[in-house]
Image (cartoon, rainbow, N blue to C red):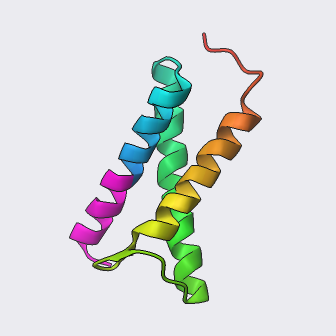
Amino acid sequence: MNFPAILLGFVVASLLGAFYHLWRGGGPVRIVFYLLMAWLGFALGTYFAHLRGWVLWMIGQVDVGFGALGALLILALGDWLTLGIREG
């Protein structure tokens, strides 16, 4: 995977994390958490789709469809697991 493909995945995952933060709210710690979860989920989603040979929505070398699905699943899971934790 080349640099533009990695950059595209990073930007799409960052947008998903930022929009999730807008929807769910929280402070600066939460947005960092959501961004990390979105990056992890996007990477796992594209990697899993690549291993299985599945394609949903390709842009260049990046399967943005499965990446977005992975990011949203990991974001929801991370949010659910941290429901009882309060910030600072």
60, above or below 31, in the image? below
Q: Nearer the viewer, residue 57 or 43?
A: 57
Residue 47 belongs to magenta span: no
Residue 50: x, y in percent? 52, 83
Return the residue found at the far left.
4
* The magenta segment: 1-12
Q: Nearer the viewer, residue 1 or 63?
A: 63
Q: Is residue 69 left or right of residue 64?
A: right
Residue 5 belongs to magenta span: yes
Return the residue found at the far top.
88
Query: Is the C terminus in the top left, top right, bottom left or bottom right quadrant?
Result: top right
Residue 65: x, y in percent? 46, 68
Q: Residue at x 75, y 36 (%)?
A: 81
62, above or below 82, in the image? below
Query: Is the N terminus in the top left, top right, bottom left or bottom right quadrant?
Result: bottom left
Where on the picture, by quarter, is residue 9?
bottom left
Residue 78: x, y in percent? 67, 41
* Number of numbered callouts drawn: 0
Q: Main secondary structure of the magenta part?
A: helix
Return the residue found at the far bottom.
53
Q: Residue at x 50, y 29 (%)?
A: 23
Q: Residue at x 68, y 15 (%)?
A: 86
Q: Residue at x 28, y 78 (%)?
A: 60
Q: Is residue 7 left or right of residue 63?
A: left
